[in-house]
Amino acid sequence: MAVNHVGHCVRDLAVAQRFYVEMFGFRMRNELAVPDAAASPLLRVPEPVGLYAVYLELDGFVLELLHFDRAGNSPRRDRDLTEPGLTHLSFAVDDLDAACARVADLGGEVLEDTVVAHRAVMIRDPDGQLLELLQLRWGQRRADVGRA
């Protein structure tokens, strides 16, 4: 077993791709126009589905940006962190202050009331997805993040 990817529905593929590439260093892996006949039953989305997916990769982690070019998509809403389901993605950054300074320029939002002693903060990407930024400790390598 292996994790294949995490899917993230976005309103504008170009804006979302720019955010993740420039903010975190993701690289484009591939893109795919998904046929309605395959997407509709798998995703439980009635035709026309209009699904186009962009796959971004960072250190073996794959983020699938999904865009549904169709009428009737659900509106964006802020989810409560206590609501069951995936809540956020977490990224370790070399310089938390510099990362926060870039968020707005890339269409996101820093949630200023969540800053914890220049060590952690929550942000939202251009589609409102909650992301946690953690300051790497001096000398800590990216490969060590998340290991006990």
Image (spheres, rainbow, N blue to C red):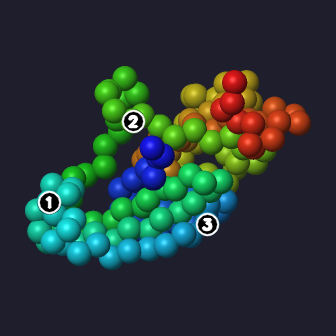
- Which residue is more in the foreground, 5 or 56? 5
**Res 86 label:** 2
Judging depth in this view, the residue of 89 and 73 nearest the camera is 89
Left or right relative to 27: residue 64: left
User: Which mark is drawn over residue 41?
Assistant: 1
As drawn, 40 above or below 102 = below
For disc 3, the marked residue is: 27
Report the label total: 3
At x 53% / y 63%, what residue is drawn?
56
Q: Earlier in the sequence, mark 2 or mark 3?
A: 3
Q: Quadrant of the N terminus?
A: top left
Cβ–Cβ under 8 Å for marks 2 and 3:
no
Residue at the image point whose x is 33% and y is 76% from the top:
33
Where does the image place residue 110, in percent across and percent down from the top left?
58, 42
Q: Amino acid at mark 3?
A: Arg
Residue 127 x/y as whole percent: 41, 53
**Kind of element beneath mark 2:** loop
Secondary structure beneath dot 3 equals strand
Q: Nearer the viewer, mark 2 or mark 1?
A: 1
Q: Earlier in the sequence, mark 2 or mark 1?
A: 1
- Residue type for callout 1: Pro
- The C terminus is located in which quarter? top right
Q: Percent x, y for residue 104? A: 59, 53
Distance Cα–Cα, label 2 vs label 1: 23 Å
Residue drawn at x 68%, y 40% as measured from the top left: 92
Residue type, mark 2 in image = Leu
- Circle 1 sits in a helix, a strand or a loop, which is it? helix
Q: Earlier in the sequence, mark 3 or mark 1?
A: 3
- Residue placed furthest toward the front: 1
The quadrant holding residue 42 is bottom left
